[in-house]
Amino acid sequence: MSRSRRESDVKYMLLMMGPAAKWQEFLQLRPEELRAHHEFMNRLNDELSAAGELVEAQGLAFPDQAKVVRTQPGGEVVVTDGPFPETKEFLAGYWIVDVADEARALAVARAASAAPGAGGAPVGQPIEVRQVMSEPEVEM
């Protein structure tokens, strides 16, 4: 069921963050557990699409595949494999949803956090919810 766009709709970014050790455990899931996890996430995305709430959702490659691009004074561009901020957590994926209010964004995050992992138990992945800012309207 799709919904019509309302004036009060607000975009939120749901960031799937987690400790590196947790992601290493995730890589050890049996094929059927991994399949159940992916089916859960695909079903969640399908439900959000049907409701007209899904703007974008993507999983990200592991941080060891990331690059950092910096433009130096004078215009030289340097691309490196880091350094990255000292952290034991990283961003694994995200959703951008266009929902009626923060309560709905939190409900979607709760659903995403309940994705099954080892033995079918919820992974309990932390999902950070942040409103996407928009420009103020300018009269012309």
Image (cartoon, rainbow, N blue to C red):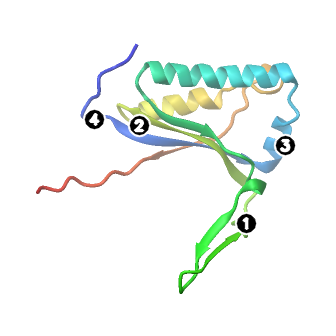
Q: Please count the marks in the image.
A: 4
User: Residue at the spot x=88%, y=25% of the render?
Assistant: 30
Residue holding disc 3: 24
Crowding around mark 4 (Cα neighbors within 10 Å: few <14, some 14 to 19, many 20+) is few
- Cα distance in 3D space between marks 2 and 3: 31 Å
* Vertical side of 135 occupied by 4: above or below: above
Separation of marks 4 and 2 at Cα, in angstroms:
11 Å
Task: Find residue 133 and report its horizontal and vertical position in percent.
Answer: 37, 51
Seen in the picture, residue 13 relative to 101 is either above or below; the reply is below
Callout 3 environment at 10 Å: few (<14), some (14 to 19), or many (20+)?
A: few
> Pointer 3 and pointer 1: residues touching (CB < 8 Å)?
no
User: What is the C-alpha distance between the residues marked 4 and 1?
Assistant: 38 Å
Discs 2, 1 touching: Cβ within 8 Å: no
Question: 71 or 3: which is nearer to us?
Answer: 71
First in sequence: mark 4 vs mark 1: 4
Earlier in the chain: of badge 4 and badge 2, it is 4
Q: For the residues carrying marks 2 and 3, which lies nearer the camera in this image?
A: 3
CB-based contact (under 8 Å), mark 4 and mark 2: no
Query: From mark 4 to mark 3, how far is it between C-alphas?
Result: 40 Å
Q: Secondary structure at mark 1?
A: loop
Residue at disc 4, secondary structure: loop
Q: Which mark is residue 120?
A: none
Q: Which amino acid type corresponds to the residue marked 4 in the rendered image?
A: Ser
Residue to which mark 1 is pinned:
86
- For mark 2, what is the residue? 102
Q: What's the amino acid at mark 1?
A: Glu
